[in-house]
């Protein structure tokens, strides 16, 4: 249900924010419309503008600044109406209604829409090998994760091109391509979004040779790990499947054993690459020491 509501939520809040900004000017800077703006505009502005302009790959879990703006806006509207002894004009009733919608919408987005409420995967266990994952290359050839053995591997399961936080997360990892190459890491971006969409992404990112995008047909790999998100795609995304994956990062050593796993429970909260790239470099240092001792 919540995936059916997210696009109307964003659109209605954006329209309410733009409309209240116009009314603030039209009514000679009536503060009631400033309050409406503060309760409705910040969330869609974050999702549609700030995430793109600043390349945000993560936010705080509870969005305290947006919540404070929302509460402040509601207080401003409430105080203004109190001074006027309640809403008497139609425009004041509309402003009050939009304020309630904006405040409740922020709380719904933070506490209900954003969390996955996922259970920890029984298959992603530090020190243990992952189950064999069936994957498809963009040329249509099929492989399994068993073929990754012999190289350190970073697996990044992402939702789709429509997710700005996913795209920015992939760009962050790609920006560290040289560091990953030096550590001997092969990077696998994995999604069920469809070969055509993934090919567009590959062309956009211009990935080096040690990066590759895989298609997870019917979420077989995600279901093996227990990280599938059935019905998790927002309604109204033509060309994308309704089901998707919960964002997950897994680092494997050359033997295929898990050395790092991040199973975020909030789609806006992603691990920074610096929190997991060091596990590969530490592994490389251990290997170098062992080689020197053997010599």
Image: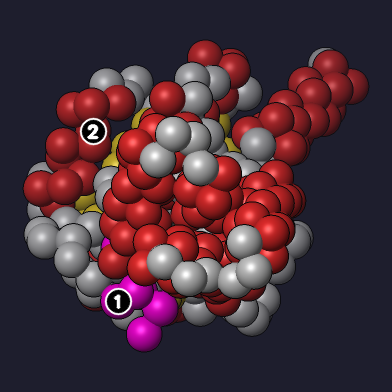
Q: Position of residue 127 (x, y in %)?
A: 75, 60
Name the image quarter holding residue 274: top right
- What residue does disc 1 label? 4
Q: Nearer the viewer, mark 1 or mark 2?
A: 1
Mainly helix, strand or loop, the magenta region? helix
| Front one among 32 and 271 | 32
Residue at left 60%, top 71%? 86
Residue at left 32%, top 47%? 19
Name the image quarter holding residue 22: top left
Q: CA distance from mark 1 to mark 2?
A: 29 Å
User: What is the secondary structure assignment of the residue under circle 2?
Assistant: helix
| Front one among 218 and 63 | 63
Rendered view: 28 above or below 232: above
Q: Position of residue 143 (x, y in %)?
A: 28, 57
Q: Which mark is residue 202?
A: 2
Instruction: Give the class, few, some or many, for how many residues have Cα within 10 Å of label 2's Cα (few <14, many ≥20).
Output: some
Magenta segment range?
Answer: 1-7
Q: Position of residue 49 (x, y in %)?
A: 40, 34
């Amino acid at each position: 249900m919540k995936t059916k509501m997210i696009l109307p939520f964003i659109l209605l809040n954006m329209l309410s924010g733009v409309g209240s900004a116009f009314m603030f000017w039209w009514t000679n800077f009536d503060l009631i419309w400033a309050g409406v703006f503060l309760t409705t505009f910040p969330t869609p502005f974050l999702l549609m503008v700030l995430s793109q302009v600043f390349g945000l790959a993560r936010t705080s879990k509870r969005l305290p600044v947006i919540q404070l703006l929302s509460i402040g806006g509601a207080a401003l509207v409430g105080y203004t109406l109190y001074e006027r002894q309640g809403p008497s004009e139609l425009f004041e009733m509309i402003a009050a209604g939009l304020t309630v919608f904006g405040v409740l919408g922020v709380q719904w987005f933070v506490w209900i829409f954003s969390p996955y409420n996922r259970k920890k995967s029984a298959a992603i266990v530090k020190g243990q090998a992952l189950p064999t994952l069936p994957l498809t290359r963009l040329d249509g050839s099929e492989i399994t994760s068993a073929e990754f053995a012999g190289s350190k591997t970073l697996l990044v399961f992402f939702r789709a091109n429509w997710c700005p936080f996913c795209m920015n997360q992939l760009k962050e990892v790609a920006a560290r391509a040289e560091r990953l190459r030096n550590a001997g890491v092969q990077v696998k971006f994995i999604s069920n979004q469809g070969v055509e969409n993934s090919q567009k992404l590959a062309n956009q990112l211009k990935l080096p040779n040690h990066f590759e995008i895989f298609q997870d047909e019917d979420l077989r790999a995600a279901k093996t790990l227990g990280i599938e998100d059935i019905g998790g795609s927002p309604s109204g995304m033509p060309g994308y499947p309704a089901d998707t994956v919960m964002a997950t990062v897994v680092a494997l050593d050359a033997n295929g054993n898990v050395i790092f796993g991040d199973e975020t429970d909030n789609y806006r909260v992603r691990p920074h690459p610096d929190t997991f790239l060091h596990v590969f470099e530490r592994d490389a240092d251990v290997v170098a020491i062992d080689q020197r001792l053997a010599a």
